[in-house]
Image (cartoon, rainbow, N blue to C red):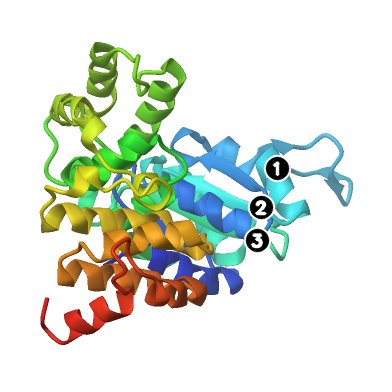
Amino acid sequence: MTIDFATFLTVAPHVLDSKLPVLVRGRHGVGKSEVVYMIAAERNLPVVERRASQMTEGDLLGLPDTADTAINGRKCTTWNAPDWLVTACEEPVLLFLDEVDRATQEVRQGLFELTDSRKINGWKLHPETLIVAAVNGGEHGAQYQVGEMDPAELDRWTVFDVEPSDEDWLKWANEKVDGMLWDFINHNRQHLEHKGDFEPNKVYPSRRSWKRFNDTAVATGVFGEEGSRDLLFNLATAFVGFEAAVSLRDFVEKYEWQVTIEDILNDGDLSKCEKWGINDHAAMIEKFEASQVFNDTLTLDQIGNLANYFVTLPSEVAMKLWTVLGDTDNIENVVALHKAEDKSGRRVSDHLVEILGGTQ
């Protein structure tokens, strides 16, 4: 069974509180590393990250030393711990082991002691150090060149199979990507990531590749009005593949007709909504929800503009907007909109009564 990131962030902390190791499994580029860093940030823990795929036995266990060690006059071997292990033993950190299923068999077996006893070669982890690993295996393992994790190995981890929802990414990306790209993904979710089988050597979109494309596009200015559409298309093709790039190019060419949250709340401009169908309005409500704009108290002008929009909505979409508004902790917006009138003097409360009474 897979879970989304919201569920993972609810359940995994209880496991980590018990100082048990957590293994996150999922497809590439879905944000496994990002969510691990989120957990660390919430606990004010520095992250010590090591890619197990690049580790040798010496990187994990340390190197032997006989220089100054003797028992009953006989020299014996001790182990000089690697730097990451010393840090994880001397101070509380989140120890993040990425790509464990791409590590050599020797390294993976060396991790048994760490996951079982929280120590390696006599070096014991700090009592507050946490262990989290990430792999691309699980139900998607056949698509990756990774080693299978046998039952004895998996038994040493608390395994979470993650399949983040579209909403997970949209909420995360709301303030991290350009608004035009956010709108594109919101309207074209099939391009957020590829979930089928992969053809060799073909570029596919992923949540990670969209973020990398966004950062490059913002830096080069191709999202702006003066930006080169050819450059945008070529960049997108390189990051997310041809099919997604074509859809993005077509979307950008028509973007001047897209409606933003600011158009409705701040400007009260509904001219672009006049020919909208129910799906267009539903996508707009999803945009409101993902932006979390209703967590803040709206101004009187914004409430008035929202009222003007609310009374134009099909009944089921209007009720969805009302639900989104009510699901926040800010009851002031609900009360204000309920009392508000649109520009013709029609009360929102009367409109709600009509919807609930089935006259709309």
Residue 115 vertical position relative to residue 145 in the rendered view, above or below: below
Which mark, by number, is residue 43?
A: 3
Residue 208 x, y percent position in the rendering: 36, 38
In space, the residues marked 1 and 2 are separated at their CA atoms by: 8 Å
Look at label 2 and name its amino acid: Asn
Q: Nearer the viewer, residue 347 or 35?
A: 347
Seen from this angle, which residue lies furthest bottom? 357
Q: Which residue is mark 2?
A: 121
Q: Nearer the viewer, residue 265 or 136?
A: 265
Residue 128 x, y percent position in the rendering: 70, 64
Instruction: Identify which residue is drawn at 50% across, 64% down.
Output: 295
Q: Quadrant of residue 7?
A: bottom left
Look at label 1 and name its amino acid: Ala
Q: Nearer the viewer, residue 80 or 28?
A: 28
Kindly check if marks 2 and 3 are in contact, taking CB atoms under 8 A apart as contact: no
Instruction: Identify which residue is drawn at 36% across, 60% down.
Output: 306
In space, the residues marked 2 and 3 are separated at their CA atoms by: 28 Å
